[in-house]
Image (tube, grey):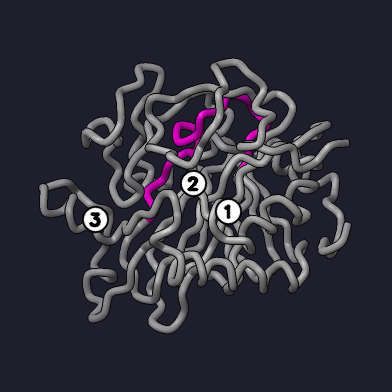
Amino acid sequence: MQGLNRDISDEEVDEYRETGVVKLRGVLSQTWVDLLAEGLDEAFYQQRELVPVFYDSSETADQLGGAGIAVLGDSRGDAMTTRGRFLTIIGGWTVNEKIRTLALESPLAYIAHRLFGASKVNYYDDQLLTKEPCSREYTAFHTDEPYYHLRGQQVCGMWMSPDVVTEESGAMQYVRGSHRWGTFFKPNAFVAQNPLDELGLAEQDDTQQPLPDIEGNRGDYDIVTHTSDPGDVIVHHSNLIHGAGPNYTSDRARRAASFRYAGDDVTYWYHRSAPPQPHHQHKLKDGDPIDCDQFPVVWRK
């Protein structure tokens, strides 16, 4: 496939299905990496007023801290003399043509097909992120499933960065095997462990439980840290617990995108816990296949 440097091995498929996460080293060509870098910079610094959902998580951290909520942090972050921002966009593909091209026309849909073993793949949405230099906020451990209106096992996030990402700059961390725990967890505000419903930011869902304190008990869990280079794609199951640390570096942003894809077994399912998604325009009901203009089929066997 054009733009794919190599195929996905059977060993990588097995790793994804068993542990819930796999880092695909050097799979995307430089053309796609450059397109991602340009799209991220445009979306965050030229099109911010146009995107459907924008969060300044550094501002959120200040608001929560001012309200007496414990925000994740550490002495190293507190000691930084300058402060960058942790920014997030949802639905960047709806306003930025470069992000849209990556979402719909890149090899990512084929990669999802290989890992799922699916006969078709739908595109669901994107999350664009940047941790500017000296951004002190953690990304609290969480799962993606409660933020989506989907049900099924063949749902993944494909995380990729045009930057060299190290532990110092906020490499992604995953609790291997947690997608098999059979538990659905409450969403949080990323910068704190508190569930959104506890903060009055989401409806309560009795089928979900609060996440355990993984940050405070790291030795009890099988955590892998995946640094990444441009061209790498890290793929994780939507119910796999994951998070990241601050960007302690003073000279390098950690820009990234997570593109979300769904396979054969996925149906629409409204989650009361999910934050607002105003750009989702459709007439789907619980249990419906998600094939529609909002969630287009981007790969078919």
Residue 231's label in the rendered image is: none
Q: Is residue 173 visible?
A: no
Position of residue 47 measured from the top left corner of the image (x, y, whole percent): 45, 65
Tag 3 secondary structure:
helix
> Which residue: 43% across, 58% down?
50
Graded by Cα atoms within 10 Å as few (under 14), some (14 to 19) or many (20 or more), the crowding at tag 2 reads many
The residue tagged 1 is 93
Whether residue 238 is situated above or below residue 36 in the rendered picture: above
Q: Return the disc, 3 or 2, that comes first in the chain's sequence.
A: 3
Tag 1 secondary structure:
helix
C-alpha distance separating marks 3 and 2: 19 Å
> Which residue: 81% across, 34% down?
117
Amino acid, disc 3: Ala
C-alpha distance separating marks 1 and 3: 26 Å
Tag 2 secondary structure:
strand
Amino acid, disc 2: His
